[in-house]
Image (spheres, grey):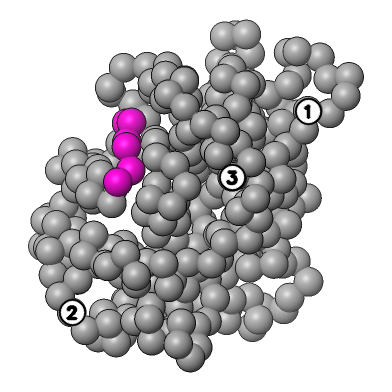
Amino acid sequence: MSVDVAKVFALAWRVAGRLPGPLLRGLCTVAADAAWLRRGGGVRQLEKNLRRVRPEVDDRTLRRLSRKGMRSYMRYFGEAFALATMSRDRIDARVRVVGIENVRVYTDQDKPIVLALGHTGNWDLAGAWCTREIAPVTTVAERLKPEELYQEFVAFRESIGITIFALTGEGDVFRGLVRAARNGAAILPLLADRDLTSKGLEVDLVGHRARVAAGPAALAITTGAPLITTVIHYERLRGPRRRAAGSPWGIVITFNPAIEMPAGVARADRVRAMTQAWVDEFAAGVREHPQDWHMLQKVFVEDLDPSRYAATVAAQGAAG
């Protein structure tokens, strides 16, 4: 029996906000544990990725870590489904920010910033908070299939105040981001820990070669906006903050200082240099909170199909 994923997600967005918090969290935990026990391709890939992040742990510890990872991942979905109906006070109680001065130094002067971030914690909750408390958020979304599912995600993110460009199929997305950067204070966060376009860069990620997107560094260099590595992770809440949040979980958004271009880097190598710089900072955050890196896909080069990867590299080389 086939499942209409778009309809399932649409139903979840309509219903989740009406469910009691403990029930919603319980359902997400059950879904996470069921997926973990089934050990499908996504869970196995998650464990491969976590093995590289934490090579020192034994197999049993790795399995526990992957289970925490699946629970973190399903927690993100549960929160996202309920986010559109979440009150401002509840959102504020769930968010703690480290390094806010690293962004306000620019946005308070009506300047844009580019954020390089990955699939960690709850980036939608972070976006809902940032677009209201710091500056308007404009970002890019992968064009999911079927189209109805993509449209559901766009409608959801627009409902929490985020402007969305489609990664493919809607004109020149990079040009749209450049225009957004010219409208004064703006936050341009790009999820870049996966290369979705086959035009990314090979970098060192936790000591292994990986493919990531070149977009954050390219956008920062093109617009002159600062590039700020951002890492998000979950934290346990207690006491008054937990009661205000309506949840035992909140997120921490860490804004690093703006990346400075290393001295003596040739113009042709600047995107690569800045990309490696933000990846190094991102990797440090992932090592500290590996269970909140929701990476169930192949990102490391050694996991990619060798012939297809060789063809991708050759095509990039031919394109200059």
Q: Earlier in the sequence, mark 3 or mark 2?
A: 2
Depth check: give the residue in front, 34 or 74.
74
Residue at image x 78%, y 50%?
207
The residue type indicated by label 3 comes to Arg
Residue 151's disc is none
Which residue lies most toward the front here? 109
Depth check: give the residue in front, 233 or 95.
95
Q: Which residue is mark 1?
A: 261
Q: CA distance from mark 3 to mark 2?
A: 36 Å
Q: How many numbered tags mark residues here?
A: 3
Residue at image x 71%, y 45%?
257
Q: Report the span colored magenta.
A: 161-166
Which residue lies most toward the bottom here? 239
Q: Secondary structure at mark 2?
A: loop
The residue type indicated by label 1 comes to Met
Q: Secondary structure at mark 3?
A: helix
Quarter of the N terminus within the rendering: bottom left
Q: Is residue 32 above or below residue 142?
A: below
Residue 104's disc is 3
Q: Which residue is mark 2?
A: 19
Q: Tell me the crowding category of disc 3: few under 14, some 14 to 19, or many 20 or more residues within 10 angstroms, Cα based.
A: some
